[in-house]
Image: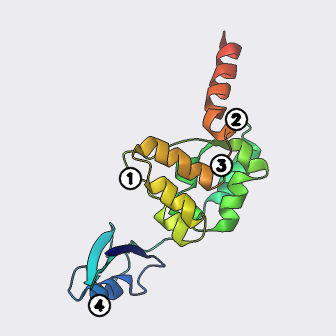
Amino acid sequence: MPRTGHIALAGAPNVGKSSLLNALVGTHLAIVSPKAQATRLPVTGLRTDGDTQYVFHDLPGLLDPDYLDVFEAMTARFPHLYGDNSALAAPNFRLRPSALKRLTTGPLADRILHGSDLPVPVSGLLAWAFRMMPWRDYRAAAAIPNPVERDAFLKRALGFSEETFTRASRILRNAGSQIL
């Protein structure tokens, strides 16, 4: 019986992810450079051993400008400032359980609105790879053909509350009634 597995090569910039991909697939597929950020977009490589096919995803190095503290300070200063969970659940936050916990619990959770980066494909692979969600949630998301529904499912699996999806409507309704 044939088997397939996906493997994400993720990590800091310039640590050898592309070299590893090239070695694993046995050909020069990904750009290798002594300069960081040579890989700007994911590169996919395939390797077949017998009845098993491996799909390797070489991902750009994860830069780490952590603006979560800045966002938190701004919400304290500006009472009507809200953040988009699409931007705030980007890889640099999603890969840190402590940052995700701050976004989904406590005072910041009330300042998050649902947003989507569509048409950017959403898969949840990184969130699963970094143990931000269980395998069954990743597989359930992968089975959802509609990317908008898949994005919402993944955000729920990451811990964003149901109110995150309706908060913008309430804020706009309240703001509209104050204007009238």
Viewer can see residue 106: yes
Residue 159 spot, x, y in % from top left: 66, 53
> In the image, is residue 96 above or below residue 107?
below
Q: CA distance from mark 1 to mark 3?
A: 19 Å
Amino acid type, mark 4: Ala
Helix, strand or loop at mark 3 = loop
Residue at image mark 3: 160
Residue depth check, mark 3 versus mark 2: number of the one nearer the observer = 3
Judged left or right of residue 36, residue 68 is: right
Residue at image mark 4: 23
Amino acid type, mark 3: Phe
Per the rendering, the mark at residue 121 is 1
Q: Residue placed at 51% from the left, 60% from the top?
A: 138
Residue at image mark 2: 80
Amino acid type, mark 1: Pro
Question: If you read the primary sequence from the N terminus, does the residue marked by circle 3 or circle 2 appear first?
Answer: 2
Helix, strand or loop at mark 4 = helix
